[in-house]
Image (cartoon, rainbow, N blue to C red):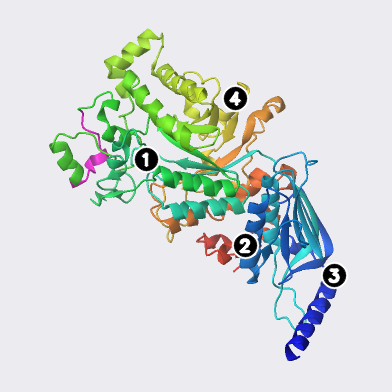
């Protein structure tokens, strides 16, 4: 009898609380969503999340429903259940084929029900990301010290750009699978849809290729790393490395897919290839020549290897190196095609990033085989030889049903027919490519290089590569240049920021350099241009910061010093 009375008391308390929430007066401060939606209505009333909350979903939305149930459970401390559609629930996920965009969503919240509609599961997922930002624990009822609730609203939203990307260099410094998943979680929270995984470099080869085991046996491990800024004050002489097995790659891809993120691999060519050349020296124009090391900053282990007849090393310093893939040898293309075949088999992405940047031409100029190739194909200079190299690789990738992305240097000597250009040296390359009717992803180092410092005063900042990129400048990024004529705007797919890791050796530091700049980038890529307002964003960012704290993320706190 006592238990029955207690149950009834709780029931009537909840009923009373729900009635009060029906007319709760919300304000603009209750809707601080990033990135800012196209349309968001302020309405009266709040939806209470409690033990009676149940999530139901249309067929094929079970993954999203489970995801939402987990978020609600973590946010409220209550166990929220996902049930099938035949069970009555008060949070419903629904496919609505009438919506125009695959990534569009409508979020409707009333005091007694919530509905998220999307044309596809991807749209539903983005609606969930907006919903999670609206959850608050400040509304109170008489016998409840604190309850979780969502302000009533109607949100209609869709992204401005189709491509919203974030890059991570795991070649200079290696990061665990667990961290890669955490990185993907952070991207998903910001409605990003592309993860550019930079897997190969001069300083390390990070992906297992079964046909060429030395790529990871040799190429994934360097004998030391410079200390301090380039070219370094010394070499630490510590072996460093790591790589992802193909099973781990599949695990990451599957995890990203659940978060509606496409993983785009980058296999660098023809430059930035020292690690591969260390594994298979015949890929170099001059296999017997010692690897050149800046200022003699070579490890004792590499010195010993060179004395013992192994001239090629995995580079231990940063920068750009002359030893690149030989363009004159057929073996080079055979190896690269075999590598790319395994990569293409692993990654569902329609894009394969092939790099194409910072390829010195000095070795090609003195290589008889490269000069022979140039003559045979009527190429006037080494820039056209690079274009031959890229176009040949593109033809192979296209034959496998994929397209290439390359940094804007692939424009030099003539652009490959179906290539998408990722413009990093400002907007010039992107404009040139768009004017030639090629798709473009804007990633200018002026606004999108997150390895740059976040503060003018570097006294208390960890070491970085240089430059200064504050949050406000990231927020000002617009992928579509004003000088590009309107008829060519359709070729701008979107934008991407890059996190190069020469000086980023830990997972905590990577997060620090990512946040809150990624939050600013997300609004630049998602929200309509007319919606953007820096002062308004700063207010919403202060609220969004709580999400960082809830998730235990490391971020640049000095950005918020004015609010503290």
In this view, the mark in front (2 or 3): 2
Mark 3 or 1, nearer chain start: 3
Q: Position of residue 292 (x, y in %)?
A: 25, 34
Q: Position of residue 80 (x, y in %)?
A: 67, 66
Helix, strand, or loop for circle 3? helix
> Which residue occupies the foreground of this view, 313 or 58?
58
Residue 92 appears left or right of 219: right
**Callout 4 touching callout 3 (CB < 8 Å):** no
Q: Residues within 10 Å of mark 3 (few under 14, many from 20)?
A: some
Mark 4 or 2, nearer chain start: 2
Q: Position of residue 450 (x, y in %)?
A: 50, 48
> Which residue occupies the foreground of this view, 435 or 93?
93
Which residue is painted at 68% across and 50% down in the image? Answer: 61
Position of residue 279 relative to residue 512, above or below, is above
Mark 1 highlights which residue?
A: 208
Helix, strand, or loop for circle 2? helix
Mark 4 or 3, nearer chain start: 3
Q: Residue furthest left?
A: 308
Q: Residues within 10 Å of mark 4 (few under 14, many from 20)?
A: many
Mark 2 highlights which residue?
A: 70
Mark 4 highlights which residue?
A: 438
Which residue is painted at 53% across and 46% down in the image? Answer: 254
Magenta region: 289-300
Residue 281 lies in magenta, yes or no?
no
- Label 4 and label 3: CA atoms lie apart by 53 Å
In this view, the mark in front (3 or 1): 1
Mark 1 or 2, nearer chain start: 2
Mark 3 highlights which residue?
A: 22
Which residue is painted at 79% across and 67% down in the image? Answer: 46
Residue 559 appears left or right of 122: left
Q: Residues within 10 Å of mark 1 (few under 14, many from 20)?
A: many
């Amino acid at each position: 009898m006592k238990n029955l009375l207690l149950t009834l008391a709780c029931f009537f308390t909840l009923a009373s609380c729900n009635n009060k929430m029906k007319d709760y007066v919300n304000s603009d401060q209750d809707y601080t969503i990033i990135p800012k939606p196209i349309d968001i209505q302020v309405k009266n009333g709040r939806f209470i999340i409690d033990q009676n909350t149940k999530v139901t979903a249309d067929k094929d939305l079970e993954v999203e429903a489970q995801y939402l149930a987990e978020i609600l459970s973590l946010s409220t401390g209550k166990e929220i259940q996902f049930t099938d559609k035949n069970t009555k629930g008060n949070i419903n996920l629904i496919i609505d084929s009438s919506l125009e965009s695959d990534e569009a969503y409508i979020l409707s919240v009333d005091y007694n029900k919530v509905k998220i509609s999307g044309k596809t599961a991807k749209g539903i997922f983005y609606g969930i990301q907006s919903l999670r930002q609206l959850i608050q624990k400040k509304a109170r009822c008489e016998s409840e010290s604190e309850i979780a609730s969502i302000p009533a609203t109607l949100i209609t939203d869709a992204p401005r750009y189709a491509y919203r990307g974030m890059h991570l260099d795991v070649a200079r410094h290696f990061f665990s699978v667990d961290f890669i998943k955490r990185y993907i979680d952070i991207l998903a929270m910001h409605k990003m849809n592309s993860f550019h995984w930079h897997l190969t470099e001069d300083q390390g080869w990070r992906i297992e290729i079964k046909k060429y085991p030395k790529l990871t046996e040799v190429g994934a491990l360097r004998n030391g790393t410079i200390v301090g800024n380039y070219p370094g004050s010394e070499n630490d002489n510590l072996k460093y490395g790591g790589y992802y097995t193909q099973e781990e790659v599949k695990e990451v891809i599957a995890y990203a897919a659940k978060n509606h993120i496409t993983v785009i691999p980058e296999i660098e060519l023809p430059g930035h290839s020292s690690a591969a050349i260390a594994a298979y020296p015949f890929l170099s124009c001059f296999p017997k020549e010692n690897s050149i090391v800046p200022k003699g900053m070579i490890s004792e282990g590499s010195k010993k290897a060179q004395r013992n007849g192994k001239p090629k090393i995995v580079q231990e310093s940063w920068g750009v190196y002359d030893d690149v893939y030989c363009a004159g040898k057929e073996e080079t293309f055979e190896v690269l095609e075999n590598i790319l075949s395994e990569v293409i088999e692993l990654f569902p992405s329609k894009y394969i990033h092939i790099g194409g940047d910072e390829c010195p031409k000095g070795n090609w100029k003195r290589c008889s085989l490269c000069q022979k190739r140039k003559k045979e194909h009527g190429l006037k200079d080494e820039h056209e030889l690079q274009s031959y190299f890229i176009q040949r690789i593109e033809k192979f990738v296209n034959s496998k049903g994929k397209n290439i992305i390359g940094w804007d240097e692939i424009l030099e000597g003539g652009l490959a027919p179906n290539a998408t250009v990722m413009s990093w040296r400002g907007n010039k390359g992107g404009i040139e490519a768009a004017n030639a009717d090629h798709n473009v992803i804007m990633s200018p180092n002026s606004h999108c290089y997150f390895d740059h410092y976040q503060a003018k005063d570097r006294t208390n900042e960890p070491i970085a590569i240089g430059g200064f990129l504050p949050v406000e400048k990231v927020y000002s990024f617009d992928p579509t240049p004003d000088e590009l004529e309107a008829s060519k705007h359709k070729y701008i797919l979107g934008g991407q920021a890059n996190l190069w890791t020469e000086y980023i050796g830990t997972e905590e530091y990577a997060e620090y350099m990512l946040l809150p700049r990624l939050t600013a980038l997300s609004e630049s890529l998602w929200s309509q241009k007319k919606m953007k307002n820096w002062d308004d964003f700063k207010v919403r960012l202060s609220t969004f910061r709580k999400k960082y704290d809830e998730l235990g993320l490391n971020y640049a706190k000095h950005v918020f010093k004015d609010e503290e």
